[in-house]
Image (tube, rainbow, N blue to C red):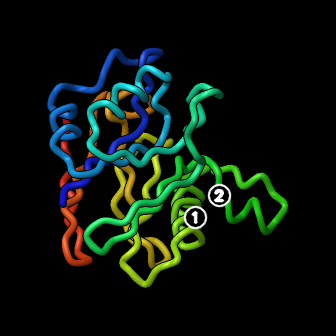
């Protein structure tokens, strides 16, 4: 099973559309994950129309009237994916009376891993997916594999290279391929 993973499209304020080859990956995927910051209701509708199945979350630049959760999960091929944008550590916010705002890479890793562990109620392999930083990540952090597909349109603070991931999932195993445009 192939899962297309993208984030931070920022359409139309910073980009016109995701690259055509990424649109092809989204259309071909069995499931699509978007980790927030579509940028507009139209960008969300475009991805939703391309995707056979979509799991998506609200990002900090999404319109306030876009109907997306802050955290969502999907299970495929024996692997649970927990998706959040990565700007807030919801666990820290809930238990420590802080705002849980992410300030650096380590905060971001904690936010995505903590949220994944708190949300998942499974013994299956667990992957936390986040966006926000526009930086590619594929790292195991505190026992959780954490993925950030970067920006699917290459907008700042990324270096101008559009990136996304495709995860191949089967029998609890996951391989991740990074695609650039």
Q: Nearer the viewer, residue 71 or 90?
A: 71
How far is disc 2 from disc 1 in space, using C-alphas? 7 Å
Against 161, is 42 above or below?
Answer: above
Q: Nearer the viewer, mark 2 or mark 1?
A: 1
* SS assignment at label 1: helix
Q: Give the position of the N terminus as an image quadrant.
A: bottom left
Percent across and percent down for residue 53 are 32, 47
Return the residue at label 2.
89
Q: Residue at x 38, y 57 (%)?
A: 147
Q: Which mark is residue 42?
A: none
Percent across and percent down for residue 27 are 19, 37
Q: Give the position of the C terminus as an image quadrant.
A: top left
Residue 120 located left or right of residue 18? right
Q: Nearer the viewer, residue 76 or 109?
A: 76
Q: Is residue 99 visible?
A: yes
Which image quarter: residue 96?
bottom right
Q: Nearer the viewer, residue 147 or 53?
A: 53
Return the residue at label 1.
115
Residue 13 located left or right of residue 95? left
Q: Are marks 2 and 1 in contact (CB under 8 Å)?
A: yes
Against 53, is 116 above or below?
Answer: below
Percent across and percent down for residue 155 are 39, 26
Q: Residue at x 68, y 65 (%)?
A: 91
Quick one: label 1, few (<14), some, or many (20+) residues within 10 Å?
many
Q: Nearer the viewer, residue 162 or 126?
A: 126
Percent across and percent down for residue 41 are 49, 23
As drawn, the residue found furthest toward the right would be 97
Q: Earlier in the sequence, mark 2 or mark 1?
A: 2
């Amino acid at each position: 099973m192939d899962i297309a993973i993208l984030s931070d499209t920022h359409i139309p304020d910073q980009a016109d559309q995701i690259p055509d080859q990424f649109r092809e990956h989204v259309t071909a995927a069995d499931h699509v994950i978007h980790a927030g910051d579509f940028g507009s209701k139209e960008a969300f509708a475009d991805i939703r129309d391309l995707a056979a199945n979509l799991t998506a979350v609200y990002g900090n630049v999404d319109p306030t009237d876009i109907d997306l959760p802050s955290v969502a999960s999907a299970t495929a091929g024996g692997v649970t994916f927990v998706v959040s944008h990565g700007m807030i550590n919801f666990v820290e916010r809930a238990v420590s009376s802080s705002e849980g705002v992410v300030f650096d890479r380590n905060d971001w890793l904690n936010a995505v891993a903590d949220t994944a562990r708190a949300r998942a109620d499974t013994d299956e392999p667990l992957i936390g997916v986040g966006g926000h930083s526009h930086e590619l990540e594929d790292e195991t952090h505190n026992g959780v594999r954490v993925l950030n597909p970067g920006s699917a349109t290459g907008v700042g603070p990324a270096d101008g290279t559009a990136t996304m991931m495709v995860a191949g999932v089967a029998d609890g195993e996951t391989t991740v391929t990074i695609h650039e445009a």
